[in-house]
Image: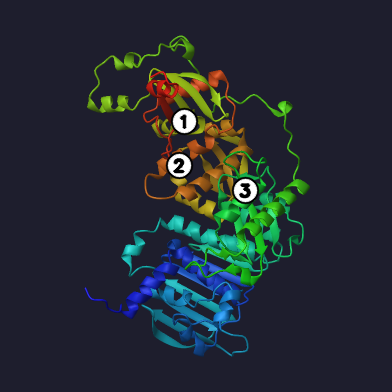
């Protein structure tokens, strides 16, 4: 095939694919345009996860009617004049790609009126081409509406998640910018329901309260004013060590108020908490790093989600030092030492052992045969199931309060206690018949404040959560009342308040893991992960024996519900070779 120029409409769709990955990308680009326009009020609406409609309205400077069509030409922008401006970009947008990219994958309508103009102007596009234009009455600012996103690109639709998950992505984008721009009043409506509203007061703590709840906001620790050095300064809020979350999505990082994703800088925040948090727990952080514009290259990613820093190591050090200092100066001192240790609680959900029928682990014969259940000749399906079962194991001890050492007829097994308990709880949850879930009701309902993405996860998995014993009802705004929880969770976490926090964290896991498959299995897997014993938790000898015994009885003991291995096996032959006995 000879080399040839691609048709302009195909070029537009390819370029649009770089900028507009999903509905949340449209929201991000339009919100950034609104902020660049100096808006103090930004309203976002979305239906069907953004696939039906996305509308972003602002009260910014607006655009004159004779510039509306020019705004939809590729690489047309008011934010750059020369090549030298590219090295000192201070606006969120600058490439002139957002509006034409959106128009290439959706039907777009824009209405805008600049200050001083007697009326507004209207423009409507389909397939990137103008099909209607003219004057129209409008308030000061701009409103952009995108309908039928990817309707004419069915291949793109196949790679999107469910509408609830896409709505959660939109909520996450708006939440991040609401945290960065506390002086702007944001309103987000998803399927006509108010999902987020910030006051726009300029107080970052009030923005955090709108996104994460009043309880979390009141606990946040401010970084000292002008913290940093002459090159980089850091401002914002971080959570005390007692306030943690189950994943990193609550670490919001901004560079010159631009929301960025940076594993390096997120790790700097985590390093500041080293020794203060348990393994697998992460802080809440809302941090803005101020740098000279020429030290930041914002033109390295099509969606501007990543930046390149000229002196990244120095920024890492400043960020880590600033957060650490705030924690040391303001957070309570952790009490350590022998007096702080308490005996670990009984393993959540552990069934009582029947000593009259089950021998203690140290008295069991190290034989590969199972009890009487193996004496009958199994059919082919049962035989395949038995092949996946473990031999009888004897718990010997614990390494690093994380791994259980067990001895078997074929050598030594190192068992990840968290992954193993996840597998046990997961199969137990799925094996219970409908209506047989053990539920713990609360005398007083527990109020739970949910972030927008958590609320979307609750809506998407409502039936599966109810099947597992959660009774949740709206209480106004984004506050819900938790009336009951699975007994497994309530007993593991010690009551209603902790069960409320556990529900919020469970919704975090569901939001992160949402995808194809049975929602009942996803809920069971997330619930098992949350309720399982943690790495770093000391176990007594009897608890280790019980963990091993229950793992032996699972159908798929080799992996946890998420596919991670539960154990490593060192055969007797491998041990002999390592010790030069063979």
Element type where label 1 sits in the image: helix
Mark 2 Cα shell of 10 Å, populated few (<14), some (14-19), many (≥20): many
249 sits to left or right of 97:
right
Location of the C terminus (image quadrant) = top left
Task: Tell me how the rendering is colored.
Answer: rainbow
The residue to which callout 1 is attached is: 420
- The number of numbered discs placed on residues in the rendered structure image is 3
- Mark earlier in primary sequence (3, 2): 3
Judge by depth and name the residue closer to the eye, 497 or 250. Answer: 250
Quadrant including the N terminus = bottom left
What kind of element bears circle 2? helix
Q: Is residue 287 above or below residue 270?
A: below
Tag 1 and tag 3, C-beta contact below 8 Å? no
Examine the rendering and report whether any part of residue 110 can be seen.
Answer: yes
Q: Nearer the viewer, residue 20 or 7?
A: 7
Residue at 43% in and 63% down: 22
Q: Residues within 10 Å of mark 1 (few under 14, many from 20)?
A: many
> How far apart are labels 1 and 2 at the CA level?
18 Å
Location of residue 542 in the rendering, given as x and y in whole percent from the top left corner: 54, 18
**Residue positioned 26% across, 24% down in the render:** 383
Q: Give the label, 1 or 3, closer to the camera.
A: 3
Q: CA distance from mark 3 to mark 2?
A: 28 Å
Q: Position of residue 523 (x, y in %)?
A: 45, 42
The residue under label 3 is 270
Residue 426 left/right relative to 291: left
- Indicate which disc residue 523 carries: 2
């Amino acid at each position: 095939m000879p080399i040839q120029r691609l048709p302009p409409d195909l070029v537009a769709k390819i370029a649009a694919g770089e900028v507009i990955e999903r509905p949340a990308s449209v929201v991000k680009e339009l919100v950034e345009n609104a902020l660049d326009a100096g808006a103090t009020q930004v309203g976002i609406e979305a239906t069907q996860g953004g696939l039906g409609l996305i509308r972003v309205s602002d009260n910014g400077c607006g655009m004159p009617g004779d510039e509306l069509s020019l705004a939809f030409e590729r690489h047309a922008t008011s934010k750059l004049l020369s090549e030298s401006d590219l090295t000192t970009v201070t606006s969120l947008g600058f490439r002139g790609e957002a509006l034409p990219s959106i128009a290439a994958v959706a039907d777009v309508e824009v209405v805008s009126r600049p200050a001083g103009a007697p009326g507004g102007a209207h423009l409507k596009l389909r397939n990137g081409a103008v099909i209607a234009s003219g004057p129209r009455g409008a308030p000061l600012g701009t409103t952009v509406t995108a309908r039928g996103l990817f309707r004419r690109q069915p291949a793109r639709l196949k790679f999107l998640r469910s509408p609830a998950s896409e709505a959660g992505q939109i909520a996450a984008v708006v939440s991040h910018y609401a945290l960065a721009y506390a002086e702007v009043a944001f309103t987000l409506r998803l399927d006509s329901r108010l999902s987020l509203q910030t006051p726009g007061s300029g107080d970052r703590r009030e923005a955090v309260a709108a996104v994460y709840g009043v309880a979390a906001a009141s606990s946040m620790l401010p970084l000292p004013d002008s913290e940093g050095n002459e090159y980089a300064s850091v401002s914002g809020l971080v959570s005390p060590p007692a306030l943690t979350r189950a994943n990193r999505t609550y670490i919001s990082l901004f560079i010159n108020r631009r929301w960025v994703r940076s594993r390096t800088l997120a790790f700097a925040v985590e390093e500041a908490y080293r020794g203060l948090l348990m393994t697998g727990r992460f802080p809440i952080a809302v941090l803005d790093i101020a740098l000279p514009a020429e030290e930041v290259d914002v033109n390295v990613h099509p969606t501007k989600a990543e930046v390149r820093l000229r002196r990244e190591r120095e920024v890492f050090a400043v960020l880590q030092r600033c957060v650490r200092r705030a924690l040391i100066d303001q957070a309570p001192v952790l009490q350590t030492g022998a007096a702080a240790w308490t005996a670990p609680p009984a393993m959540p959900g552990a069934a009582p052992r029947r000593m009259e029928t089950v021998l203690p682990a140290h008295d069991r014969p190290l034989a590969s045969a199972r009890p009487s259940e193996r004496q009958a000749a199994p059919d082919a399906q049962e035989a395949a199931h038995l092949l996946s079962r473990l031999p009888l194991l004897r718990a010997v001890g614990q390494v690093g309060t994380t791994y259980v050492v067990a001895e078997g007829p074929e050598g030594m097994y190192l068992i990840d206690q968290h992954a193993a308990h996840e597998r046990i709880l997961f199969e137990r949850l799925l094996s219970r018949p409908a209506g047989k879930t053990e539920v713990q009701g609360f005398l007083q309902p527990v109020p739970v404040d949910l972030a927008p993405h958590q609320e979307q996860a609750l809506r998407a998995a409502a039936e599966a959560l109810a099947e597992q014993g959660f009774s949740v009802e709206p209480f106004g705004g984004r506050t819900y009342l938790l009336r009951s929880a699975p007994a497994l969770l309530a007993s593991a976490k010690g009551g209603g308040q902790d069960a409320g926090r556990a529900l919020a964290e469970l919704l975090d896991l569901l939001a992160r893991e949402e995808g194809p498959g049975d929602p009942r299995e996803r809920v069971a897997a997330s619930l098992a992960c949350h309720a399982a014993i943690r790495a770093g938790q000391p176990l007594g000898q009897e608890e280790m024996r019980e963990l091993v015994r229950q793992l032996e009885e699972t159908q798929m003991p080799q992996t946890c519900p998420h596919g991670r291995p539960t154990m490593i096996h060192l055969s007797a032959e491998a041990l002999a070779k390592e010790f030069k006995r063979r």
